[in-house]
Image (cartoon, grey):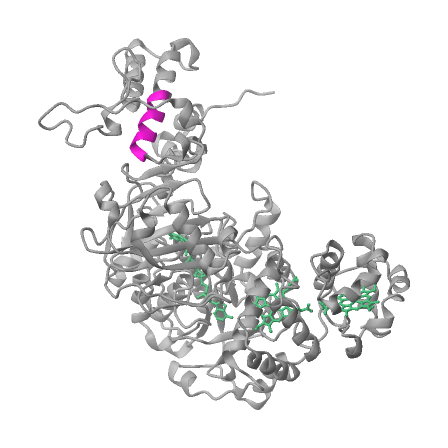
Amino acid sequence: MTEKVTRREILNLIGAAGGSAAVLGASAALGLMPNSAAASIPQLKPLDPANRKSVAILGAGISGLTAAYELSKAGYDCIVLEASHRPGGRNMTVRSGDIIDEVGNRQVCEFDDEPHMYFNAGPARLPSTHRNILHYCKELGVELEVFINESKEAYVQDDNMFGGKPIKNAMFTTNARGFMAEVLAKNFTRQELDQPFTEWEAERILGMVRSFGDLNSANEFRGSSRAGYADIDGGYLAHGIQKEMVSFRELLKSSYVNRLLNANEGETGPILFQPVGGMDKIITGFVKTMPERVYYNAIVTAVELGDDSVNIAYRYKGMENSIKADYCLNCIPTHLMSGITHNFPRDYTDAMLYVRRGEAYKSAFQAKERFWEKEDIYGGISWVNQPIRQIWYPPHGMFKEKGVILSSYDFGGGMHFTRLSQEERIEAAISQGEKVHADYRKYVEKGITIAWNRMNHMLGCAARWQRGAVMTSDEEKLMHTLRSPAANRHYFIGDQVTLHAGWQESAIVSALWSVNDLHNRAIGNSAGINPAPLV
Amino acid sequence: MKNFLLACLLTGSAFTLFTPVAFAQQSGMPIPGQEPVLTSICMTCHGAYGQGNPVVGGPRLAGMQAWYLKNQLESFRNGWRGMEKDYLPAYEMRETASALTETDINQLMVMLEAWDAEPAPDTITGDVSKGAELYQQCVACHGADAMGNELLAAPALAGQNDWYLLSQLKLFKSGYRGSHPEDIFGLRMQVVLPLLNNEQDMQDVLAYINSID
Ligand SMILES: Cc1cc2nc3c(=O)[nH]c(=O)nc-3n(C[C@H](O)[C@H](O)[C@H](O)COP(=O)(O)OP(=O)(O)OC[C@H]3O[C@@H](n4cnc5c(N)ncnc54)[C@H](O)[C@@H]3O)c2cc1C
């Protein structure tokens, strides 16, 4: 057996052969450095007016709207057919008077009618690395503000830890890091590392470990003011009283030891943004540029691929209508498309049958008072080891009288609440929230719940392609099939045909890929830009 | 609804180039017996023309006998079906059925008659001759042609999605369906359950039913 080559060694090899430029490119491929590819917004050469083309876009999800926007700019005749009374699909912001169209549990939001009193029932966070969606925010004039994902002043609550008493996030993380650093420092000897370090390097490493865990000069963790002071005035005019260290054994009883320290890394790491006034400002931004092209309550019922066109039947205003277009971009969830009449090729149909509906659940309350601000919380998440899992405090509307608080968020295993009645959902959210904020019940009112698995015209969230722990190459091929055009004119779009479902960026990237491919075909490069990228 | 699309193409009422204005002025065909809100709700799970949706798990409604539709909606509303929270498909249907009024149900029954009913595609294979033997025990209630018998409240099995019938046989077998003491129609299925010993038996009998429709 050959020995495994380290990434560093590979770099040296490539560097020797190709100069430093080679090293840069390769390191991006290996995932060491971010790839600096520019946002993939297409610059479509407008169509020749003598060669007009029509595109029917099924579903006004963010992918459908992105496609309609770009294609309209390039001179295509576009129309968007949306089954719901509202655009945006999963991008949904709930405000006073809004209807929540859950099958069997229709709700009307009764929050106060004020700009900051909204709830992002679907997406709520925009990572700073999601270049395409940020590009559209800029282009459409959607004002953004910073979203706060982590507050050290928010809580961690677990019935298995401290008898269920909530502790501040700062307490949890400071102690966990202190313990880890102390273990690391104690075991740090040069021999144990595969690379020999110089004395100077070794000292640097120890310094890093000490500062990571706030160790004393003897490399011991004896508590830290990072966890806050025991007395609230501490440290200003008089010496602060440092909080007692907590027993690390106690933290170990909670499964959060395995999942709290990564909550603010990667895509949910700083910096995140949110549109001022609600996530659907992006949707309104798109629709404003083409209001006449988007039809609501227009339910697609059949899609027929023809030799030189796509025929679409839809219900609209009590009539069965049909429309014929040169191309079709379709973001209707594949699990709903399975109940829509079509003549898709066999491999397409098989792929559609394979995908499973994803799950997600969120709920929110209007808070009569911003009680969290009295606890030094101005955003971020409390982690609760209960079905509600998370409580989010709004980073906007600071110091106002009221606010909208997210009272549960179950992404991925959202069926617990989905099974409950509205009353049971609300009661569960309150009683579990009381584990964190003792007088929660006193403050919260007008609860709304969104079980994505039950939302009309959606019945799910991020598509599930994977049956096992990792996606198999067969599964990837199935997805690839749906991403590729059928009969050279029908494309599935949306996060559902990407490897990264659950983010709007994916939905947009998918739309842009299809738009590019379609345009290439329309202007006579009959092969388009196929094959659709597998990865 | 391919017929509809075809009709439009033949009569030339569909057009190649559309503009939003033309779209707004476009006239379509009225939907027979259509009550928009109701159908739009059922469609999401049962398919655009009631043809069934295998991924969501909603069976074919088009072609169902109206009296059977009513029986089942009542069965859900009475909590004889769909009470078990660990079988979500029926649980979801029960929630929907509970929200329906008598008027809704009557309208649905009228609407159902207006829907095109094409037999559902076959997806199950099995030993047809073994299935034929097993089916002899079903004939009395479901009929030799598997078209059902209203007097006995036994529905047509021919034409229904076979994956759905399979799931129902499993539910009967496990007591999730047809075991509530007041569910007199559901209880009638009890007599044949000892015959269906495993999934293979069920597949065989369904393969036979597929062969007769
Ligand atoms: C709880 C939750 C949290 C999320 N958090 C984030 C986040 O923080 N950041 C982020 O970027 N993303 C997040 N996402 C993911 C994001 O919402 C999706 O990736 C994105 O909105 C998907 O857009 P889409 O265009 O692919 O499809 P969708 O939004 O699913 O659009 C599909 C559209 O098709 C329509 N439709 C269905 N049937 C028919 C029919 N018969 N005829 C016509 N139209 C039909 C639907 O009504 C809908 O409008 C979250 C999602 C959820 C649910």
B191 or B56: nearer the viewer: B191
On the question of residue A20 being in view, the answer is: yes
Drawn side of residue B62 relative to residue A144, left or right: right
Which residue appears at 55% of the width and 83% of the height?
Answer: B34
Drawn side of residue B141 relative to residue B47, left or right: right
Residue A381: horizontal and vertical position, in percent?
A: 33, 43
Quadrant in the picture for residue A23: top left
Residue span colored magenta: A168-179
**Magenta stretch: dominant secondary structure:** helix
On the question of residue A11 being in view, the answer is: no
B9 or B179: nearer the viewer: B179
Which residue appears at 55% of the width and 85% of the height?
Answer: B31
Is A170 magenta? The answer is: yes
A403 or A484: nearer the viewer: A403
Instruction: Examine the rendered structure and indicate whether residue A366 appears above or below residue A100.
Output: above
Drawn side of residue A460 relative to residue A475, left or right: left
Instruction: Examine the rendered structure and indicate whether residue A419 appears above or below residue A113.
Output: above
Which residue appears at 39% of the width and 81% of the height?
Answer: B20
Residue B53: horizontal and vertical position, in percent?
A: 62, 66
Residue A472: horizontal and vertical position, in percent?
A: 59, 44
Residue B93: horizontal and vertical position, in percent?
A: 59, 65
